[in-house]
Image (tube, coloured by chain):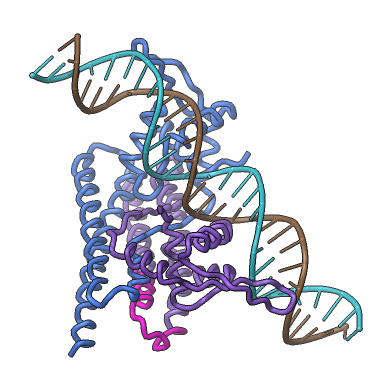
Chain colours: A purple, B blue, C cyan, D brown
Amino acid sequence: MELSATAYVILGMVRWEPRSGYEIKAAVDGTTRFFWAASYGQIYPELKRLSEAGLIAGSDSPTGGRRRTVYEITADGEAELTAWLRQPPQTSEMREEGLLKLFFAGALPPGEAVEIVRAMRADRLATNARLRAIESAIEGTVEDPFPMIVLRSGIEFTQWFADWCERTEAEILAAAKKGRG
Amino acid sequence: MELSATAYVILGMVRWEPRSGYEIKAAVDGTTRFFWAASYGQIYPELKRLSEAGLIAGSDSPTGGRRRTVYEITADGEAELTAWLRQPPQTSEMREEGLLKLFFAGALPPGEAVEIVRAMRADRLATNARLRAIESAIEGTVEDPFPMIVLRSGIEFTQWFADWCERTEAEILAAAKKGRG
DNA sequence: TTGCGGATATATCGACCTGATATATAGTCC
DNA sequence: GGACTATATATCAGGTCGATATATCCGCAA
């Protein structure tokens, strides 16, 4: 039985507490989104697969006339999750359109490249602020230390990236000045 | 005309010099792979689309009996590329299975979580070494400063990440000791 | 009370992307 | 000549994203 990493996101999320597909999506957006996203297009089919495989169990719990299925993890699911946690991590990817544009910035007139770095910096700082807000909100409320450790890695990373942009902007401007002088 | 970011990778690559699909793939793997990857499954169909759109021009240049099409950028392609470079970057994604596992590491017995951080650190250090090797190899050979700037961002980032892993390992071990004591 | 907007809930689709695989030819080394 | 690697193009299953569709529920205001 081969499961995608997203399947394990679902297992991990319902392990903390039973959730509907909608709640899983909201939990992912509020937590792992920074380093592992998931969309409805993955979540709902995956819930069916995991349910058929007996790794989670769904039960109807409608709100009035609105149908709703809440899933909880099974003993098999828990075993599958911990077995996966013990395997060395494989996937490590990045897609940074800003770095891609900077890479080809030689095609722009001198002086325009700094705009790319400025836009990246503003973006990283905005993410940093969002993550800091989450940090303040959950500070001291959770007993499990690992979500907070990972959240802080995001805060440090976006801060590092913003600082790199600032330094690089200065570097590009200095080189342009030297080139002109 | 809507182009994917990967289409612009191709435009940027053939702008430096005419290349075959195979050579574009090799160039991507040697340079932008760290922050923007591309596979044959994207490159070959995209070359056809860009060629039909008149943004690149292909010419047959076989090696003996082995067919080979080399593409070069057109004036339209160059205009399209610089117009894209002037738009603010959109996509910024990360997929770090290690952080995902660490996030759920509370499901593991205490003491096992450090293994995840150790594996991530080893991996980041290996990438760092590869990037440094590229840096040494191309040092002083390229006039365009931007590829080197981007390469160094990768070197700094992997170094920062490895350092974060080291600090986090110590933090986890200290917490475990405190928990036991 | 009627209606509007936003939240909850599930489902689907086109497009993008990866990794693997298939098919051929060319060059190198023993 | 055979083994191996590099060059070159093509394809496919499956993962993933963003947007969209459908429907219900709730609070609030006209």
Question: Is any part of residue B60 visible from this angle?
Answer: yes
Magenta-span inclusion, residue B15: no
For the point 22% across and 47% down, which residue is it? B130
On screen, residue A76 above or below C1: above
Q: Is B124 displayed left or right of B43 in the figure? A: left
Q: Nearer the viewer, residue A149 or B19?
A: A149
User: Which of the 4 image quarters holds residue A60?
Assistant: bottom right
* The C terminus of chain B, quarter of image: bottom left
Query: Residue A61: x percent and y percent?
Result: 63, 77
Residue extent of the magenta highlight = A137-157
Query: Residue A97: x percent and y percent?
Result: 45, 51
For the point 40% across and 42% down, which residue is it? A106
Q: Is B96 displayed left or right of B131 in the figure? A: right
Q: Nearer the viewer, residue A171 or A57?
A: A57
Magenta-span inclusion, residue A147: yes
Query: Residue A89: x percent and y percent?
Result: 31, 58
* The N terminus of chain B, quarter of image: top right
Q: Is B62 displayed left or right of C6 in the figure? A: left
For the stretch drawn in magenta, what is the main secondary structure?
Answer: helix
User: Which of the 4 image quarters holds residue B162?
Assistant: bottom left
Question: Is any part of residue A33 visible from this angle?
Answer: no
